Amino acid sequence: MWLSALRDEQRLALMRLAHNVVVSDGLLDPNEEGMMNEFRREMDLSGTDELEYMELEGIGEIFDSRRSRIIALLNLLKLSYADGAFEIEEECLLKQISESFAVNDEEFLLLDNWVKRLTALEDEAQVLMQSQ
């Protein structure tokens, strides 16, 4: 969502942060892998199959606007729900990222709620497309 609005440096950083999220719980779910591929397509990134862990120090300078920070958090939250469960490890990592982005707990909960509602609507649309 809105990933094409990110600069090249932010796109690569987002992919590395996404890698952090999917490995944080120790499991790589096919749905997470599929969403990572969607990120690559939306950001027109190829050759990012082998991603390294990204240190969180300094990410506030890479994502230097509120817009880029919110885009990153919304997409990372959506990724964290891709496997059907928001694991505690993912939540802790995303809260650390949000702190680096100067997003407070109340804002984080609003973003999380928005992503949950969006995911529910997407699931509903999938059901509608399959119904006869």
Image: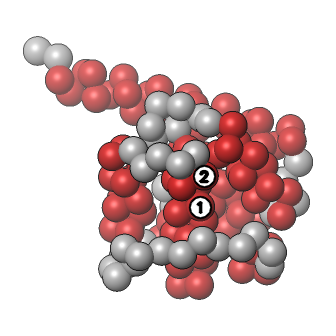
Q: Position of residue 99 (x, y in %)?
A: 85, 57
Disc number placed over residue 20 in the picture, else none: 1
Q: Which mark is residue 24?
A: 2
Q: CA distance from mark 1 to mark 2?
A: 6 Å
Report if residue 34 is visible in the image: yes
Up-down relation of residue 27 to residue 88 (above or below): below
Say whether residue 51 is left or right of residue 102.
Answer: left
The answer to whether the residue labelled 1 contacts the one labelled 2, judged by CB atoms less than 8 Å apart, is yes
Choose top left, top right, bottom left or bottom right for residue 132: top left
Q: Nearer the viewer, residue 58 or 66?
A: 58
Q: Helix, strand, or loop for circle 2?
A: helix
Residue at 44% across / 28% down in the picture? Answer: 121
Looking at the picture, which amino acid does disc 1 mark?
Answer: Asn
Q: Quadrant of residue 59?
A: bottom right
In the picture as drawn, the residue positioned furthest to the top comes out as 132
Q: Residue at x 60, y 52 (%)?
A: 24
* Left or right of 131 in this view: 76: right
Image coords of residue 63 (percent x, y): 72, 74
Position of residue 105 relative to residue 131, above or below, is below
Residue nearer the viewer, 64 or 89: 89
Residue 104 image point, x, y percent: 88, 48
User: Looking at the image, is 44 positioned above or below residue 88?
Assistant: below
Q: Residue furthest front?
A: 26
